[in-house]
Amino acid sequence: MPVIATLTMNPALDMSTSAERVEPVRKLRCSPARRDPGGGGVNVARMAHRLGARTIAIFPSGGLTGQMLERLVEAEGVEATAVAIGSETREDVTVLDETSGEQYRFVLPGPHLHGVEWMACLRTLAELPTRPDIFCASGSLPPGVPDDFYARVAEIVESWGVRFALDTSGAPLKAALAERVFLVKPNLRELRELTGAPLSDEPSRVAACRALIARGRLGAVALSLGHEGALLVTAHDAWRAQALPIRPVSSVGAGDSFLGAMLWGLASKLTLKESFNLAMAGGSAALLAPGTELARSADVRRLLAQVIVEPVPEPRAAAVGR
């Protein structure tokens, strides 16, 4: 059984509900609420566990919300390693407008972590008794945590000789890329912010991913493109996968399901390309799940046969003379 460990610095208790119509002022009568454990790394661990991995989720936890989060994580079979903090763990709310089919997502900033608290998270990571096959840090950093936090995480994981996957954005991502990172998973907006380029076509997107790889110690970029599918780029190869023709029930958790499935594949000794196939099935399966629920393993395996991954043609060198 592969072992995958994750770190989530800004976890959340995700609540989802629906109303006939979402509109201002009027009191909205909602359906019964569903609560799921949330936050990038927590969701990645949940997805990988559903596919058959032993998963360990490290996250700060505080207050009654944190206690409920811990119980929900463990109820799914994920090993919760909670680091106590003084403030309450955040809640996020997703509301479905039943009339329009649109989702409204209300995401809170998370508690402020003091130096002693975020350093305790690093210490817990460094002292993790089980060395995973692959390690993932995912999600935003809460207030109080320095931008170089994930760079420090990368140093610890590199000292183990374990591959490190990172899903974050902005300054924390930029700082981490100075260290050894095996895989990053930006979306198109995040890659545009990182590069400052419009990235309006496939060649420019592949080139931008290659530029990130060439300037640092990065192994691969999985670029999610929403309804356009995704790209997987390394220094020598690039693959594309088109989105499957699915009418989404909810898009919440699709990126985390994508990454959780991909890491399960890598930890199970599949190739990058094979793991990319699995990731596309995972992200697509999440679209079939309601509210804040993640992909179901049966849907992932069913959709896997429909995924088509093909190489991106390399640009031809310009002709010299005639």
Image (tube, rainbow, N blue to C red):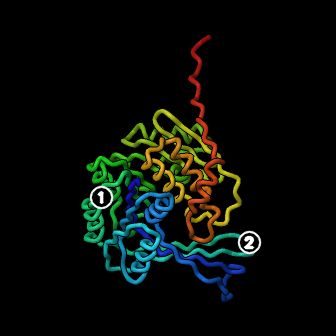
Whether residue 109 is visible to the viewer of this picture, yes or no, is no
Whether residue 54 is visible to the viewer of this picture, yes or no, is yes
Indicate which label's residue lies in the foreground, 2 or 1.
Answer: 1
Give the residue at x 53% y 49%.
Answer: 192
Mark 2 lies on a secondary structure that is loop
Q: Amino acid at mark 2?
A: Ser
Q: Nearer the viewer, residue 193 or 89?
A: 89
User: Residue reaching furthest bottom?
Assistant: 27
Which disc number belongs to residue 130? 1
Residue 186, given in percent of the width and then of the height, sits at 50, 52
User: Residue reaching furthest top?
Assistant: 322
Give the residue at x 30% y 48%.
Answer: 158
Describe residue 256's horizontal placement relative to residue 124 as left or right. right
Mark 1 lies on a secondary structure that is loop
Give the residue at x 65% y 78%.
Answer: 18
Residue 124, given in percent of the width and then of the height, sits at 27, 65
Dividing the picture into quadrants, the one containing residue 100 is bottom right
Q: Nearer the viewer, residue 172 or 78?
A: 78
C-alpha gap between disc 2 and disc 1 = 47 Å
Q: Nearer the viewer, residue 199 or 66?
A: 66
Q: Quadrant of the N terminus?
A: bottom left
Give the residue at x 54% y 37%.
Answer: 238
Q: Which residue is mark 2?
A: 100
Residue 276, given in percent of the width and then of the height, sits at 53, 46
Q: Residues within 10 Å of mark 2 (few under 14, many from 20)?
A: few
Choose the circle earlier in sequence order: 2 or 1.
2
Q: Amino acid at mark 1?
A: Thr
Q: Quadrant of the C terminus?
A: top right
Describe residue 192's horizontal placement relative to residue 226 as left or right. left
Asked if 281 appears above or below 250 in the picture, the reply is above
Q: Residues within 10 Å of mark 1 (few under 14, many from 20)?
A: few
